[in-house]
């Protein structure tokens, strides 16, 4: 997983009014759970941009008033009208802790079917996995060089040692679609 750092502060006042005041100052209230105790905190909104507007899986080095935690983004809430980030939930992790997260899939190589005139289509962009935090990769590289016209690669053909894949095995990850112009020539 990629790593990003967030520096936050303990929240002294909890509740709706205090949270609204923090948001007016450009801060995002949040909660860190999964460890020995729950920690309510706030941090500047711009620090969360790398986590939210990317498909990548991130480990967060969270520093709250000098105390350091390792965490992942568990949930985020947005304002219904202006799409501002209004709250985050972070899950504290250790290298051995089993977590569930999504990791991006990157296709590598040029498919044989694409060279013959087909179109390579990536139907699954992220893969939901469960396993120890130390075993979760930054991304899954999938070689599509052997993919021919009309063929697909399914989730069941992926192997990630130490991790359990939670997506249905029958879901296609990538396939080579046959264009309409080629359909008649292939059947003849």
Image (cartoon, rainbow, N blue to C red):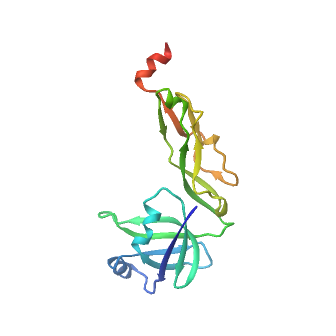
Q: Is residue 147 above or below residue 93?
A: above
Looking at the image, which is closer to me, 30 or 184?
184
**Residue at the extreme top:** 188
Q: Residue at x 54, y 59 (%)?
A: 57
Looking at the image, which is closer to me, 12 or 140?
140
Q: Position of residue 110 (x, y in %)?
A: 53, 36
Q: Residue at x 54, y 34 (%)?
A: 111
Q: The N terminus lies in which quarter of the figure?
A: bottom right
Q: Position of residue 173 (x, y in %)?
A: 54, 41
Q: Is residue 87 above or below residue 104?
A: below
**Residue at the extreme bottom:** 12
Q: Position of residue 123 (x, y in %)?
A: 49, 41
Q: Quadrant of residue 155?
A: top right
**Count of labels in the image:** 0
Q: Position of residue 68 (x, y in %)?
A: 58, 79
Q: Residue at x 61, y 69 (%)?
A: 93
């Amino acid at each position: 997983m990629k790593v990003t750092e967030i520096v936050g502060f303990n929240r002294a006042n909890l509740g709706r009014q205090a949270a609204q005041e923090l948001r007016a100052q450009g801060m995002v209230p949040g909660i860190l759970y999964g460890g020995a105790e729950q920690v309510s905190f706030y941090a500047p909104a711009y620090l969360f941009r790398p986590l939210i507007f990317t498909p990548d899986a991130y480990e967060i080095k969270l520093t709250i008033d000098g105390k350091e935690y390792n965490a992942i983004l568990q949930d985020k809430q947005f304002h219904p009208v202006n799409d501002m980030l209004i709250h985050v939930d972070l899950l504290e992790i250790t290298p051995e802790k089993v977590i569930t997260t999504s990791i991006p899939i990157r296709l590598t190589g040029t498919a044989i079917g694409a060279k013959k005139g087909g179109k390579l289509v990536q139907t699954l962009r992220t893969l939901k996995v469960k396993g120890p935090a130390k075993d979760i990769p930054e991304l899954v590289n999938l070689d599509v060089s052997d993919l021919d016209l009309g063929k697909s690669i399914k989730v069941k053909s992926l192997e990630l040692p130490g991790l359990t894949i939670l997506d249905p095995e029958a879901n296609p990850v990538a396939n080579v679609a046959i264009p309409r112009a080629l359909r008649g020539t292939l059947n003849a």
